[in-house]
């Protein structure tokens, strides 16, 4: 069993930055590929970024490429999402997810564990 706890959300202005963190319980964090998803009101949850067990492999949604960076620190059981140049369209609840295995996925159904979410609100 893995428990995920996100933090770092908040209310910011367009152009600002935030760094989300997701801390995983347990001693096997390195066994999991990790993903960040987001869900805006009235919209479906979508994959934002993901990282494989090997940090060299990452995914970014087109809407966040060049602005967001996903990284992981296995020693701290933590995955991060650095979000720069935030836009009002980035307003959503952001969820961290863990998938046992080497490779990430962009599909929600492929993830085994989810955090409770952290709210990000970007004002114009």
Image (cartoon, rainbow, N blue to C red):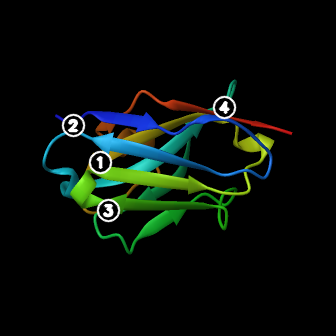
- Residue 7 at x, y = what percent? 46, 36
Which tag, 4 or 1, sits closer to the chain's start? Answer: 4
Q: Residue at x 48, y 30 (%)?
A: 117
What is the CA distance from the residue labelled 1 to the residue labelled 3?
A: 8 Å
In screen coordinates, is 39 left or right of 88?
left
In screen coordinates, is 106 left or right of 77?
right
Task: Read off the residue under disc 2.
Answer: 2
Task: Read off the residue under disc 3.
Answer: 103
Nearer to the camera, 22 or 57: 22
| Labelled disc at residue 99 | 1
- Residue 82 at x, y = what percent? 55, 56
In screen coordinates, is 71 left or right of 28?
right
Q: Give the structural element (helix, strand or loop) at label 2.
A: loop
Nearer to the camera, 115 or 100: 115
Callout 4: few (<14), some (14-19), or many (20+) C-alpha neighbours within 10 Å?
Answer: some
What is the CA distance from the residue labelled 1 to the residue labelled 2?
A: 10 Å
Q: Label 2 near label 4: C-beta < 8 Å?
A: no
Which tag, 4 or 2, sits closer to the chain's start? Answer: 2
Q: Which mark is nearer the camera, 4 or 3? A: 4
């Amino acid at each position: 069993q893995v428990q995920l706890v996100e933090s770092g959300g908040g209310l910011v202005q367009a152009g600002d930055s935030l760094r989300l963190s997701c801390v995983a319980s347990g001693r096997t964090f390195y066994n999991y590929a990790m993903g960040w998803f987001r869900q805006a009101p009235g919209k479906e949850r979508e994959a934002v970024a993901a990282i494989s067990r090997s940090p060299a492999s990452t995914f970014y949604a087109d809407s966040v490429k060049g602005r967001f960076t996903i990284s992981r620190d296995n020693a701290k059981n933590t995955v991060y999402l650095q979000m720069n140049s935030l836009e009002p369209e980035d307003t959503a609840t952001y969820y961290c997810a863990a998938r046992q295995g080497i490779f990430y996925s962009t599909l929600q159904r492929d993830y085994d564990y989810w955090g409770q979410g952290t709210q990000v609100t970007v004002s114009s």
